[in-house]
Image: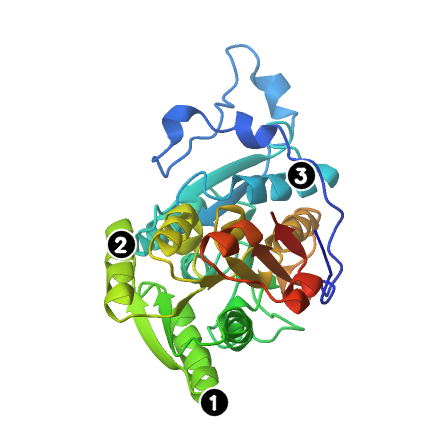
Protein backbone atom coordinates (compact mmCIF):
# COMPACT_ATOMS: atom_id res chain seq x y z
CA UNK A 1 0.00 0.00 0.00
CA UNK A 2 1.40 3.38 -0.96
CA UNK A 3 0.32 6.70 0.49
CA UNK A 4 1.22 10.32 -0.26
CA UNK A 5 -0.31 13.56 0.92
CA UNK A 6 -0.70 16.05 -1.92
CA UNK A 7 -1.30 19.20 0.13
CA UNK A 8 -1.96 19.83 3.82
CA UNK A 9 -5.25 21.25 5.05
CA UNK A 10 -5.11 25.06 5.29
CA UNK A 11 -6.13 26.63 8.56
CA UNK A 12 -4.74 23.84 10.77
CA UNK A 13 -6.78 20.67 11.11
CA UNK A 14 -7.08 19.39 14.63
CA UNK A 15 -5.66 16.05 15.70
CA UNK A 16 -7.68 12.88 15.18
CA UNK A 17 -9.81 11.70 18.05
CA UNK A 18 -11.23 8.20 18.58
CA UNK A 19 -14.87 7.72 17.70
CA UNK A 20 -16.89 8.94 20.64
CA UNK A 21 -19.04 6.30 22.23
CA UNK A 22 -21.76 8.91 22.45
CA UNK A 23 -22.05 8.84 18.67
CA UNK A 24 -23.76 5.48 18.90
CA UNK A 25 -25.35 5.79 22.30
CA UNK A 26 -27.32 8.86 21.24
CA UNK A 27 -29.12 6.95 18.49
CA UNK A 28 -31.91 4.59 19.47
CA UNK A 29 -32.94 2.17 16.76
CA UNK A 30 -36.44 3.60 16.75
CA UNK A 31 -35.11 7.02 15.68
CA UNK A 32 -34.04 5.83 12.25
CA UNK A 33 -36.16 7.47 9.62
CA UNK A 34 -37.52 10.03 12.09
CA UNK A 35 -35.97 13.39 11.28
CA UNK A 36 -36.91 14.93 14.61
CA UNK A 37 -34.73 13.65 17.45
CA UNK A 38 -35.97 14.58 20.88
CA UNK A 39 -33.59 15.99 23.42
CA UNK A 40 -33.34 14.34 26.85
CA UNK A 41 -36.02 15.44 29.32
CA UNK A 42 -34.31 18.00 31.56
CA UNK A 43 -37.40 19.12 33.50
CA UNK A 44 -36.79 19.24 37.26
CA UNK A 45 -38.29 16.61 39.49
CA UNK A 46 -40.76 17.82 42.14
CA UNK A 47 -38.92 19.59 44.93
CA UNK A 48 -35.69 19.93 42.98
CA UNK A 49 -36.32 23.15 41.05
CA UNK A 50 -33.89 25.21 43.13
CA UNK A 51 -31.07 22.70 42.58
CA UNK A 52 -31.67 22.48 38.84
CA UNK A 53 -31.94 26.25 38.46
CA UNK A 54 -28.34 26.57 39.69
CA UNK A 55 -27.04 24.36 36.88
CA UNK A 56 -26.18 25.98 33.51
CA UNK A 57 -28.37 24.86 30.62
CA UNK A 58 -26.69 22.57 28.12
CA UNK A 59 -26.16 24.24 24.75
CA UNK A 60 -27.79 22.56 21.77
CA UNK A 61 -25.81 21.88 18.59
CA UNK A 62 -27.94 21.11 15.56
CA UNK A 63 -26.69 18.83 12.77
CA UNK A 64 -28.54 19.36 9.49
CA UNK A 65 -27.99 16.79 6.73
CA UNK A 66 -29.67 16.24 3.33
CA UNK A 67 -28.94 12.53 3.43
CA UNK A 68 -30.03 9.48 5.40
CA UNK A 69 -29.17 8.69 9.01
CA UNK A 70 -26.29 6.24 9.25
CA UNK A 71 -24.62 7.09 5.93
CA UNK A 72 -21.73 9.01 7.53
CA UNK A 73 -21.56 7.78 11.11
CA UNK A 74 -17.76 7.66 11.06
CA UNK A 75 -17.59 11.33 10.06
CA UNK A 76 -20.11 12.45 12.68
CA UNK A 77 -18.00 10.59 15.24
CA UNK A 78 -15.06 12.81 14.29
CA UNK A 79 -17.15 15.92 14.98
CA UNK A 80 -18.21 14.53 18.35
CA UNK A 81 -14.65 13.51 19.18
CA UNK A 82 -13.27 16.94 18.34
CA UNK A 83 -15.95 18.58 20.46
CA UNK A 84 -15.13 16.19 23.32
CA UNK A 85 -11.46 17.11 23.01
CA UNK A 86 -12.49 20.74 23.50
CA UNK A 87 -14.54 19.82 26.59
CA UNK A 88 -18.01 19.42 25.08
CA UNK A 89 -19.49 15.93 25.51
CA UNK A 90 -22.91 15.07 24.11
CA UNK A 91 -25.29 14.12 26.90
CA UNK A 92 -23.05 15.59 29.60
CA UNK A 93 -22.66 19.32 28.93
CA UNK A 94 -23.94 19.44 25.36
CA UNK A 95 -26.97 18.20 23.42
CA UNK A 96 -26.55 17.30 19.76
CA UNK A 97 -29.75 17.09 17.74
CA UNK A 98 -29.73 15.53 14.26
CA UNK A 99 -32.05 16.44 11.42
CA UNK A 100 -31.83 14.20 8.33
CA UNK A 101 -33.81 15.02 5.17
CA UNK A 102 -33.56 11.44 3.82
CA UNK A 103 -32.53 12.72 0.40
CA UNK A 104 -35.58 15.00 0.15
CA UNK A 105 -33.94 18.39 -0.27
CA UNK A 106 -37.26 20.24 -0.03
CA UNK A 107 -37.49 19.15 3.63
CA UNK A 108 -34.36 21.05 4.63
CA UNK A 109 -36.03 24.45 5.27
CA UNK A 110 -38.51 22.88 7.69
CA UNK A 111 -35.79 20.94 9.48
CA UNK A 112 -33.68 24.08 9.78
CA UNK A 113 -36.68 25.91 11.25
CA UNK A 114 -37.00 23.16 13.89
CA UNK A 115 -33.40 23.75 14.99
CA UNK A 116 -34.05 27.49 15.18
CA UNK A 117 -37.12 26.84 17.35
CA UNK A 118 -34.94 24.60 19.51
CA UNK A 119 -32.71 27.66 20.06
CA UNK A 120 -29.58 25.86 18.90
CA UNK A 121 -26.32 27.51 19.92
CA UNK A 122 -24.72 26.39 16.64
CA UNK A 123 -26.03 24.65 13.53
CA UNK A 124 -23.66 22.37 11.65
CA UNK A 125 -24.89 22.24 8.04
CA UNK A 126 -23.51 19.44 5.88
CA UNK A 127 -23.33 20.42 2.18
CA UNK A 128 -24.56 23.51 0.31
CA UNK A 129 -28.33 22.80 0.34
CA UNK A 130 -28.30 22.36 4.13
CA UNK A 131 -26.18 25.48 4.62
CA UNK A 132 -28.47 27.58 2.43
CA UNK A 133 -31.54 26.29 4.29
CA UNK A 134 -29.97 27.15 7.64
CA UNK A 135 -28.89 30.57 6.39
CA UNK A 136 -32.44 31.31 5.23
CA UNK A 137 -33.87 30.18 8.58
CA UNK A 138 -31.72 32.39 10.82
CA UNK A 139 -29.51 35.45 10.58
CA UNK A 140 -28.33 35.20 14.19
CA UNK A 141 -27.61 31.57 15.13
CA UNK A 142 -24.03 30.65 14.13
CA UNK A 143 -23.76 28.20 11.22
CA UNK A 144 -20.75 26.00 10.51
CA UNK A 145 -20.92 24.48 7.04
CA UNK A 146 -19.00 22.26 4.67
CA UNK A 147 -19.58 22.86 0.99
CA UNK A 148 -18.03 21.65 -2.26
CA UNK A 149 -19.22 24.88 -3.92
CA UNK A 150 -17.72 28.36 -3.78
CA UNK A 151 -19.30 29.72 -0.56
CA UNK A 152 -19.04 33.31 -1.80
CA UNK A 153 -20.70 32.55 -5.14
CA UNK A 154 -23.63 30.72 -3.51
CA UNK A 155 -24.16 33.50 -0.96
CA UNK A 156 -23.06 31.85 2.27
CA UNK A 157 -20.32 34.37 3.12
CA UNK A 158 -19.14 37.80 2.00
CA UNK A 159 -15.56 36.60 1.56
CA UNK A 160 -13.41 33.64 2.55
CA UNK A 161 -11.13 35.68 4.80
CA UNK A 162 -13.91 37.69 6.46
CA UNK A 163 -17.24 35.85 6.26
CA UNK A 164 -19.03 38.85 7.73
CA UNK A 165 -22.26 37.16 8.83
CA UNK A 166 -23.43 34.24 10.96
CA UNK A 167 -21.85 31.48 8.83
CA UNK A 168 -18.39 30.05 8.27
CA UNK A 169 -16.93 26.61 7.65
CA UNK A 170 -14.99 24.53 5.15
CA UNK A 171 -14.80 24.76 1.37
CA UNK A 172 -13.83 21.27 0.25
CA UNK A 173 -13.42 22.02 -3.49
CA UNK A 174 -14.83 18.71 -4.78
CA UNK A 175 -17.13 20.12 -7.47
CA UNK A 176 -14.13 21.84 -9.08
CA UNK A 177 -12.09 18.64 -9.45
CA UNK A 178 -13.79 17.30 -12.57
CA UNK A 179 -10.83 17.99 -14.86
CA UNK A 180 -8.40 16.15 -12.58
CA UNK A 181 -10.79 13.24 -12.08
CA UNK A 182 -11.28 12.95 -15.83
CA UNK A 183 -7.52 12.95 -16.35
CA UNK A 184 -7.00 10.16 -13.83
CA UNK A 185 -9.82 8.17 -15.42
CA UNK A 186 -8.21 8.62 -18.84
CA UNK A 187 -4.94 7.20 -17.47
CA UNK A 188 -6.81 4.11 -16.28
CA UNK A 189 -8.88 3.78 -19.46
CA UNK A 190 -6.78 5.37 -22.26
CA UNK A 191 -9.28 4.50 -24.98
CA UNK A 192 -12.28 6.13 -23.29
CA UNK A 193 -14.11 8.34 -25.81
CA UNK A 194 -17.58 8.58 -24.19
CA UNK A 195 -17.76 9.37 -20.48
CA UNK A 196 -20.91 9.69 -18.39
CA UNK A 197 -21.38 12.28 -15.66
CA UNK A 198 -23.84 11.39 -12.89
CA UNK A 199 -25.40 14.42 -11.17
CA UNK A 200 -28.25 15.04 -8.75
CA UNK A 201 -30.58 17.66 -10.31
CA UNK A 202 -32.00 18.48 -6.86
CA UNK A 203 -28.56 19.86 -5.93
CA UNK A 204 -28.40 22.40 -8.73
CA UNK A 205 -25.31 24.31 -7.56
CA UNK A 206 -23.11 21.23 -7.49
CA UNK A 207 -24.62 19.78 -10.68
CA UNK A 208 -24.11 22.95 -12.71
CA UNK A 209 -20.52 23.36 -11.54
CA UNK A 210 -19.65 19.76 -12.32
CA UNK A 211 -21.23 19.91 -15.78
CA UNK A 212 -19.39 23.13 -16.61
CA UNK A 213 -16.00 21.95 -15.32
CA UNK A 214 -16.13 18.49 -16.86
CA UNK A 215 -17.49 19.60 -20.22
CA UNK A 216 -14.69 22.12 -20.63
CA UNK A 217 -12.04 19.56 -19.67
CA UNK A 218 -13.52 16.88 -21.93
CA UNK A 219 -13.72 19.19 -24.95
CA UNK A 220 -10.04 20.03 -24.58
CA UNK A 221 -9.01 16.35 -24.90
CA UNK A 222 -11.65 15.21 -27.37
CA UNK A 223 -13.95 13.27 -25.03
CA UNK A 224 -17.74 13.25 -25.31
CA UNK A 225 -19.60 13.88 -22.04
CA UNK A 226 -23.08 12.48 -21.45
CA UNK A 227 -24.90 13.89 -18.41
CA UNK A 228 -27.20 11.44 -16.61
CA UNK A 229 -29.39 12.61 -13.69
CA UNK A 230 -30.45 10.68 -10.60
CA UNK A 231 -32.06 11.83 -7.36
CA UNK A 232 -33.41 8.59 -5.89
CA UNK A 233 -32.53 4.90 -5.79
CA UNK A 234 -34.61 3.89 -8.81
CA UNK A 235 -33.21 6.72 -10.89
CA UNK A 236 -29.68 5.48 -10.20
CA UNK A 237 -30.66 2.15 -11.79
CA UNK A 238 -32.20 3.98 -14.74
CA UNK A 239 -29.05 6.10 -15.10
CA UNK A 240 -26.89 2.99 -15.47
CA UNK A 241 -29.32 1.59 -18.03
CA UNK A 242 -28.83 4.82 -19.99
CA UNK A 243 -25.04 4.58 -19.67
CA UNK A 244 -25.10 1.01 -20.98
CA UNK A 245 -27.40 2.03 -23.83
CA UNK A 246 -25.06 4.89 -24.74
CA UNK A 247 -22.06 2.54 -24.55
CA UNK A 248 -20.28 4.76 -22.07
CA UNK A 249 -16.61 3.85 -21.66
CA UNK A 250 -16.35 5.30 -18.14
CA UNK A 251 -18.20 7.35 -15.52
CA UNK A 252 -17.56 10.36 -13.28
CA UNK A 253 -19.86 10.46 -10.24
CA UNK A 254 -20.57 14.03 -9.14
CA UNK A 255 -20.06 15.30 -5.61
CA UNK A 256 -23.37 14.98 -3.75
CA UNK A 257 -24.43 13.74 -0.33
CA UNK A 258 -27.15 11.59 -1.89
CA UNK A 259 -24.56 9.69 -3.94
CA UNK A 260 -22.39 9.40 -0.83
CA UNK A 261 -25.26 7.62 0.90
CA UNK A 262 -25.75 5.32 -2.13
CA UNK A 263 -22.05 4.49 -2.57
CA UNK A 264 -22.51 0.72 -2.23
CA UNK A 265 -25.27 0.71 -4.85
CA UNK A 266 -23.15 2.83 -7.20
CA UNK A 267 -20.06 0.66 -6.80
CA UNK A 268 -22.08 -2.52 -7.30
CA UNK A 269 -23.80 -1.29 -10.47
CA UNK A 270 -20.58 0.08 -11.95
CA UNK A 271 -18.86 -3.27 -11.46
CA UNK A 272 -21.86 -5.28 -12.67
CA UNK A 273 -22.04 -3.26 -15.90
CA UNK A 274 -18.24 -3.11 -16.27
CA UNK A 275 -18.15 0.69 -16.25
CA UNK A 276 -14.92 2.12 -14.75
CA UNK A 277 -15.90 4.99 -12.45
CA UNK A 278 -14.17 7.71 -10.48
CA UNK A 279 -15.68 9.18 -7.32
CA UNK A 280 -14.82 12.06 -4.96
CA UNK A 281 -14.16 10.37 -1.61
CA UNK A 282 -12.23 7.39 -0.25
CA UNK A 283 -15.45 5.91 1.12
CA UNK A 284 -16.44 4.91 -2.44
CA UNK A 285 -13.41 2.64 -3.14
CA UNK A 286 -13.80 1.31 0.39
CA UNK A 287 -17.31 0.25 -0.68
CA UNK A 288 -15.96 -1.43 -3.83
CA UNK A 289 -15.70 1.49 -6.25
CA UNK A 290 -12.73 1.68 -8.60
CA UNK A 291 -11.06 4.98 -7.76
CA UNK A 292 -11.60 8.28 -5.95
CA UNK A 293 -9.96 11.68 -5.97
CA UNK A 294 -11.20 14.36 -3.63
CA UNK A 295 -10.92 16.17 -0.32
CA UNK A 296 -10.21 14.26 2.87
CA UNK A 297 -13.61 14.22 4.55
CA UNK A 298 -11.99 13.19 7.83
CA UNK A 299 -10.10 16.47 7.91
CA UNK A 300 -13.20 18.39 6.84
CA UNK A 301 -15.33 17.00 9.66
CA UNK A 302 -12.61 17.51 12.27
CA UNK A 303 -12.53 21.15 11.21
CA UNK A 304 -16.32 21.38 11.56
CA UNK A 305 -15.96 20.15 15.13
CA UNK A 306 -13.10 22.54 15.83
CA UNK A 307 -15.00 25.58 14.57
CA UNK A 308 -18.14 24.55 16.47
CA UNK A 309 -16.10 24.32 19.68
CA UNK A 310 -14.56 27.75 19.09
CA UNK A 311 -17.98 29.30 18.60
CA UNK A 312 -19.31 27.63 21.75
CA UNK A 313 -16.36 29.22 23.58
CA UNK A 314 -17.30 32.68 22.29
CA UNK A 315 -15.75 33.19 18.83
CA UNK A 316 -17.92 34.78 16.16
CA UNK A 317 -18.43 33.17 12.71
CA UNK A 318 -17.82 36.55 11.09
CA UNK A 319 -14.27 36.48 12.45
CA UNK A 320 -13.43 32.87 11.51
CA UNK A 321 -12.12 32.59 7.93
CA UNK A 322 -13.51 29.86 5.70
CA UNK A 323 -10.99 27.02 5.58
CA UNK A 324 -10.16 25.78 2.11
CA UNK A 325 -9.58 22.05 2.32
CA UNK A 326 -6.81 21.27 -0.14
CA UNK A 327 -5.70 17.95 1.31
CA UNK A 328 -6.69 15.81 -1.66
CA UNK A 329 -6.56 12.02 -1.67
CA UNK A 330 -6.21 9.50 -4.47
CA UNK A 331 -7.51 6.05 -3.49
CA UNK A 332 -7.53 3.03 -5.83
CA UNK A 333 -9.31 -0.28 -5.30
CA UNK A 334 -6.88 -2.68 -6.98
CA UNK A 335 -9.19 -5.66 -6.59
CA UNK A 336 -12.00 -3.85 -8.43
CA UNK A 337 -9.54 -2.92 -11.18
CA UNK A 338 -8.65 -6.59 -11.60
CA UNK A 339 -12.35 -7.57 -11.75
CA UNK A 340 -12.85 -4.98 -14.50
CA UNK A 341 -9.78 -6.22 -16.36
CA UNK A 342 -7.94 -2.93 -15.86
CA UNK A 343 -4.17 -2.77 -15.37
CA UNK A 344 -3.42 0.16 -13.08
CA UNK A 345 -0.32 2.06 -14.30
CA UNK A 346 2.62 1.93 -11.92
CA UNK A 347 2.77 5.72 -11.76
CA UNK A 348 -0.79 5.85 -10.38
CA UNK A 349 -0.02 3.17 -7.81
CA UNK A 350 3.07 5.15 -6.79
CA UNK A 351 1.21 8.40 -6.09
CA UNK A 352 -1.94 6.89 -4.56
CA UNK A 353 -2.62 7.74 -0.94
CA UNK A 354 -4.11 4.28 -0.51
CA UNK A 355 -4.31 1.15 -2.65
CA UNK A 356 -6.98 -1.29 -1.52
CA UNK A 357 -5.98 -4.86 -2.27
Looking at this rendering, what residue extends furthest in the top direction?
Answer: 47
Residue at x 41%, y 57% (from the top left corner) = 137
Mark 2 and mark 1 lie on one chain; the one further toward the N terminus is: 1
> Which of the 4 image quadrants contains residue 296?
bottom right
Q: Position of residue 354 (x, y in %)?
A: 65, 54
Q: Which mark is residue 282?
A: none
Residue at x 65%, y 72% (from the top left corner) = 162
Residue labelled with disc 3: 81
Residue at x 76%, y 59% (from the top left corner) = 12
> Regarding mark 1 in the picture, which secondary structure is present there?
helix
Mark 2 residue crowding within 10 angstroms, few (<14) / some (14–19) / many (20+): some
Q: Kindly report the distance in space between the C-alpha atoms of the residues bearing marks 2 and 1.
A: 30 Å
Q: Position of residue 336 (x, y in %)?
A: 49, 52
Looking at this view, is 90 or 23 the one in front?
23
Q: Reply above or below: 131 against 216.
A: above
Q: How is the image coloured?
A: rainbow
Residue labelled with disc 2: 237
Looking at this view, is 22 or 6 the one in front?
6
> Regarding mark 2 in the picture, which secondary structure is present there?
helix
Q: Which mark is residue 220?
A: 1
Mark 3 and mark 1 lie on one chain; the one further toward the N terminus is: 3
Looking at this view, is 170 or 311 the one in front?
170
Q: Reply above or below: 246 against 131.
A: below
Q: Position of residue 159 (x, y in %)?
A: 60, 76
Amino acid sequence: MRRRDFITLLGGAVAAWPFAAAALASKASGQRGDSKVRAPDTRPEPGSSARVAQQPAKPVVGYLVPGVYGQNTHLVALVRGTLAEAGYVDGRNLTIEDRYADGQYDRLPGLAAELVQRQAAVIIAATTPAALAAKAATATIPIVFNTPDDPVAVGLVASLARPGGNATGVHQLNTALGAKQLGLLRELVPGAARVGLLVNPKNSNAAETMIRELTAAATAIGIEISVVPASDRSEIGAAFATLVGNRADALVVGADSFFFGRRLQLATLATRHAIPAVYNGREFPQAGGLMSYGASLSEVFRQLGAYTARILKGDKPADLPVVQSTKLELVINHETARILGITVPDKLLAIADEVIE
